[in-house]
Image: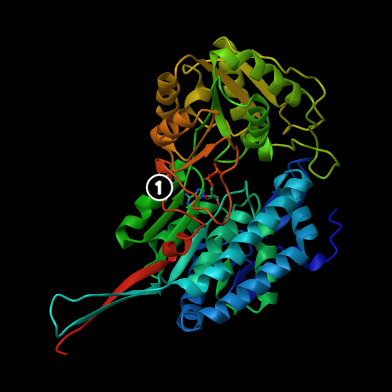
Amino acid sequence: MLKLKDPSLFIQQALIGGAWTGAAGGATVTVDDPATGAVIGTVPDCSAEDTERAIAAAAAAFRTWRLTTAAERARLLERWHDLLIENADDLALIMTLEQGKPLAEARGEILYGATFIKWFAEEARRSYGMTIPAPTTDRRILVSKEPVGVAAVITPWNFPNAMITRKCAPALAAGCTVVIKPSELTPYSALALGLLAERAGIPAGVINIITGLPKIIGATLTASPDVRKISFTGSTAVGSLLMAQCAPTVKRLSLELGGNAPFIVFDDADLDAAVEAAIVSKFRNGGQTCVCANRLLVQAGIYDAFAEKLAARVRAMRVGPGVDDGTQIGPMINAAAVRKINTHLDDAMALGARNITPRDDLPMGERYVAPAVLTGATTAMRLASEETFGPVAPLFRFESEAEAIEIANGTPYGLAAYFFTENLHRAWRVGEALEFGMVGLNTGSVSMEVAPFGGVKQSGLGREGGPTGMEEYLEVKTFHVGGL
Ligand code: ADP
């Protein structure tokens, strides 16, 4: 099944306080391969008690980890980074097996995930404080940064590696310890990361990983007074629930939630560049990312040309198992994902959309969805207001710039937006008018370790990566010295 160079990277146990372990009661959950539906293995279904043990281990480790020097933490993070790179092929294979994405994309994610570790290893040394001129001569005021404490990290299945490194690297760099709860659909990528962290010399208890179904684990993490911070990436519904569950213990929160990204192509756009970016933004990971273009708004003068060029590219896409050479669209994560996509497609077709890329060459298997370009999309359709999370590109026609901005902002979400124009004045006007945390002008990608990532409105709280990413795991302490 798995032809790993280092088979020890495939682990079916949780990591608590440096010990690889099953759930206290022995319960497990199975994990399957989206390409075939076959069971890959099991992982412990951790209970409240297991979760408490992981929190206690993280709290104990925090007492010493917080006292290490920034240089020491940076050194350990660098080693962890290097081990990801050295094991990239195995990590990619594990990811494709449990998540379904094409192997080349999985490898790309491992390298992308590693960039966060490198970045925050570098940032570790730079959590500077400040001194403030005091209002009286007998006083000095100093401001320093301290780690928040134990951070719980809850991550989704669409980026099983990078969503973990993007949270854990800044947490560890800041001096925090973590309890990770990966998606129950993709736990093996997380567990392999845990093993590599151990091999890098990161001390026991600094990284704990509990696997299993989310409700009890989530309730236990949020209720615990010892957990001082929750960093979550996932749906808005769950993010909002976690926020409510954190209220009684007033935790720090970072939330990366759903999006409904507009992708606007103006008449004066570079057509080829816009098509290329649409392919990247819409079809990466089979359309299963929170920054994927969800609504492609195309101005009337360029609509037909854009539709035809995009369709030609989409018709040529290879759909198949992620491990097959040349696959561009792998299987969707599970049956529920396929149902949602098909519901959106049926609804759009019933309301007058036209699929201009029909095909009948899908591989066998229930989780494959044909990539589609739909013309005639309207705001009355479900795919206009909900994230489709699949390889479906609906093209909405608009006439004026004002109309495009109104449609683009007409959503409770505000994560990523993209637009294409060669006009400098329009570039500034539209860029400033879009109510989103990230705006891409003439590019379909906004995710990289050096830049803040995050959303406004119901897309979340806080920013990950970039020069501000470590702040999410730091508290400000003001030290007043009086009577001088
Ligand atoms: P998605 O739609 O991407 O699957 P979810 O929000 O359902 O998003 O899942 C993201 C992460 O949140 C996963 O690790 C999942 O297990 C976890 N999760 C789901 N429900 C809860 C919950 N009630 N409490 C804590 N975590 C949860």
Residue positioned 68% across, 32% down in the render: 276
Looking at this view, name the residue that lies furthest to the front: 424
Residue positioned 45% across, 42% down in the render: 236
Residue positioned 74% across, 35% down in the render: 329
Q: As shown in the figure, which amino acid type bears the numbered disc 1? A: Leu
Q: Is residue 5 above or below residue 269?
A: below
- Disc 1 target residue: 241
In which quarter of the view is residue 42 placed? bottom right
Q: Is residue 130 above or below residue 350?
A: below
For the C terminus, give its image quadrant. Answer: bottom left
Q: Nearer the viewer, residue 300 or 4?
A: 300
In which quarter of the view is residue 323 placed? top right
In this image, 404 relative to 286: left or right?
left
Q: Is residue 335 above or below residue 345?
A: below
Mark 1 crowd level (few <14, some 14–19, many ≥20, 10 Å Cα): few
Looking at this view, name the residue that lies furthest to the top: 352
**Is there any visible trace of residue 28 in the rendered image?**
no
In this image, 113 relative to 387: left or right?
right
Percent across and percent down for residue 460 are 42, 46
**Is there any visible trace of residue 107 in the rendered image?**
yes
In this image, 330 relative to 266: left or right?
right
Percent across and percent down for residue 447 are 57, 48
Percent across and percent down for residue 364 are 82, 30
Q: Nearer the viewer, residue 297 or 232?
A: 297
In which quarter of the view is residue 273 placed? top right
Helix, strand or loop at disc 1? helix
